[in-house]
Amino acid sequence: LAKTLRLIANDGPDAFYKGRIADLLVKEMKRGGGLITKKDLALYQAVVRKPIHGTFRGFDVYGPPPPSSGGICLIEMLNILENFDLKKQGRLSARTMHLMIEAMRRAYCDRARHLGDADFVKIPKHLTTKEYAKKLAKSIDLNRATPSEKLAPDISIKKEGESTTHFSIIDKNGLAVSNTYTLEQSYGSRVVVRGAGFLLNNEMFDFNWNPGVTNQKGTIGTKPNRIQPGKRMLSSQTPTIVAKDGKVLLITGSPGGRTIINTVLCVILNVMEHGMSIEDAVQAPRLHHSWFPDRAYFEKAQAYRKLMTSLKKLGHRIRSRRQGDAHSIYVDPKTGAYHGASDSRIIGKASGY
């Protein structure tokens, strides 16, 4: 792996896509019956896309564009929730949690309905508008959970990984980086390119690999993310930077498959809406709903029995499980001091140099 990284450092991208590393990768493909050819590697072009931009309570929020679904879904949820005073309701009130679940439910429904590689799919511009969010906010029943099936009469519903890494960085000049990368599932495809020292990913799994089959268990088979030659698969990665007046305030992101977007939403709301310290915001229990399966997940639910009872009375089905790994940085707008928060859910640390 050290030799591989040194070749890339010295010779640039061509070392990987056209040189010795490409030869090793193609050799591994032939050995294992894989599909990637040297021509495929030579023709591949990375695409730099404009970040998704939105605002929340006057703060600028920047997230990744398609084929990641993270930026659009995050902005859509923040736009919906901006119509409600969550701070007044309280961070762990049944009303706040109910509204968050309903915002998640609607954004993930739109994710299934519309999102895929923008080179192949025309993505509606209204998804991140305030006007559309107001319409969705009005569709939320404050006293009852919306059954997920009712949100998508246009989608036929059949009646039937931990491998991502995120890091947040800021330098002494305020240049910030929010980076999420993944192999998709533990150890990716579990194939090492011999002589090159790296694993091949399993990202093809992120396509809607069962066309036309969208079911209550969470399988999505909608058209925008079906596999096509040259198409990039939909991701949930949500590396995010929140800024105010052009200055960085928060750098965050997480692993966790479809839970990633909602982990980032929870951290942002904890800091920007509820005024929590970055450490408390990262360690606080998290909420997740992804349209289907039609259930909400809340960390340590057993410790919040009264809250869970209130949510169940509203019609929500609740489960408990660990969620995410949101190593984050907060910049104090008054002092300029950097505050790093390491997520206790997995091994990691915050360091300054």
Image (cartoon, helix red, strand yellow):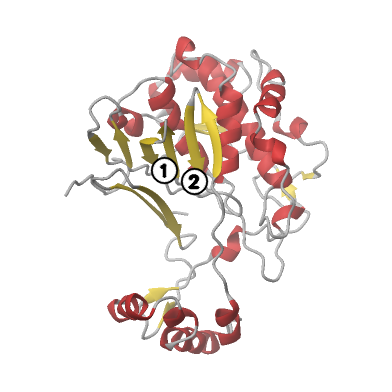
Choose the circle earlier in sequence order: 2 or 1: 2
- The amino acid beneath tag 1 is Gly
Task: Identify the image quadrant of residue 337.
Answer: top left
Q: Element type at marker 2?
A: loop
Would you place residue 207 above or below residue 98 in this image?
below
Q: Element type at marker 1?
A: loop
Q: Is residue 298 visible?
A: no
Which residue shows up at 53% across the image and 48% down it? 64
Which quarter of the figure is the N terminus placed in?
A: bottom left
Circle 1 is placed at which residue position?
324
Circle 2 is placed at which residue position?
238
Q: How many C-alpha atoms fall within 10 Å of the one at disc 2: few (<14), some, or many (≥20)?
A: many
User: Residue farthest to the left?
Assistant: 353
Going by the image, does 56 lie left or right of 351?
A: right
Kindly report the distance in space between the C-alpha atoms of the residues bearing marks 2 and 1: 12 Å
- Foreground: 134 or 50? 50
Which residue shows up at 45% across the image and 59% down it? 182
Task: Identify the image quadrant of residue 324.
Answer: top left
Q: Position of residue 35 (x, y in %)?
A: 61, 81
Which of labels 2 and 1 is toward the front? 2
Would you place residue 60 above or below residue 18 in this image?
above
- Foreground: 47 or 158? 47
Going by the image, does 92 lie left or right of 208?
A: left
